[in-house]
Image (spheres, rainbow, N blue to C red):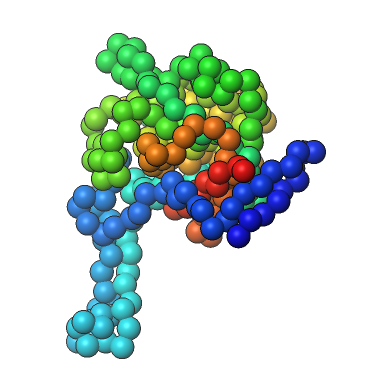
Amino acid sequence: MKVAITHSGKQYQADFSLPIDISIPLTGTPDNVNAWYVPHPTIQPVTDGDFVGSVAAGSSTNFNNILFNPHGHGTHTECVGHITKEFYNVNEVLTTYFFITQLVSVTPEPQGEDLVITRSQLETALEGTTPEAVVIRTYPNPQTKLRKQYAHSNPPYLLEAAALFLKEIGIKHLLIDLPSVDKEKDNGALLAHKAFWNYHGELRLDATITEFIYVPDTVADGPYLLNLQIASFVNDASPSKPVLYEIL
Ligand SMILES: N[C@@H](CC(=O)c1ccccc1NC=O)C(=O)O
């Protein structure tokens, strides 16, 4: 299914029959990707007395409860409500779902004991483009990222200046393959989140951060059409399904 798109005076074409899903599947198993010290998600049949919500166990239907945490268990999209006293929910904030995006790859640089993404790395990678959304793939990029247990691993993160740069050039949606844009243990500083959402000024209520994506190596850097969909959770964050389409 080919589509022709006119956006900001430019013409694009994409083929909806060739989606590139950059979400991480969520499973109810211990090897589900994990961060923030939460137990693994569970997907279990509802039970009620003798009833077990499983066809294999004699029920008419499979009928599972799912217990998971959007921030800790996989691809999720969050709004400024992640860091504010006031309640903002991502379902109200994300109101359109297609964006022109740029996929960039960076190798985080050592800074003391950390690995960080710098402003100049993003400047270089974006090559002067100012898309609505940026998808950041970090190297190395092994497939084990799909089930990595990140707790206490001090994953790479974005420097405050890098997040400020993305805000300055008007990026509305930031997607990254790490558990957070900030350092794991930062005593609540959350510098990159705050910079991107302009926490100390007028909040960028319509800006989102999507963490825990996975972009396979076979996908080349460059421009894409992004379809960013969430489940309609009234919460600061929701599991999400970002999908890229090559621009033809
Ligand atoms: N680094 C923060 C914690 C943090 O960032 C966080 C904690 C739980 C769930 C998500 C978090 N950040 C996600 O981007 C801290 O050390 O307080």
* Residue depicted at 59% across the width and 53% down the height: 15
**Closer to the camera, 18 or 155?**
18
Does 41 sit above or below residue 45? above
> Quadrant where the C terminus lies?
top right
The picture places residue 240, in percent across and down from the top left corner, at: 47, 52
Residue 88 vs 196, above or below: the answer is: below
Given residues 196 and 87, the one toward you in this image is 196
Q: Quadrant of the N terminus?
A: bottom right
Q: Is residue 199 visible?
A: no
Query: For the point 48% across and 41% down, which residue is it?
Result: 210
Query: Could you say which is closer to the camera, residue 234 or residue 247?
Result: 247
Residue farthest to the right, as pictured: 9
Q: Nearer the viewer, residue 6 or 190?
A: 6
Horizontal side, residue 8 vs residue 37: left or right:
right
| Residue drawn at the location 50% of the way across and 52% of the way down | 19
| In the image, residue 19 above or below residue 126 | below
Residue 117 visible to the viewer: yes
Which residue appears farthest toward the top when viewing the image?
A: 112
* Count of number-bearing discs: 0
The x and y percentages for residue 209 are 51, 38
Residue 85: x and y in percent read 52, 40
Q: Quadrant of residue 159?
A: top left
The quadrant in which residue 59 appears is bottom left
Q: Position of residue 206 (x, y in %)?
A: 64, 41
Residue 158 placement, left or right of 110: right
Q: Residue at x 71, y 48 (%)?
A: 5
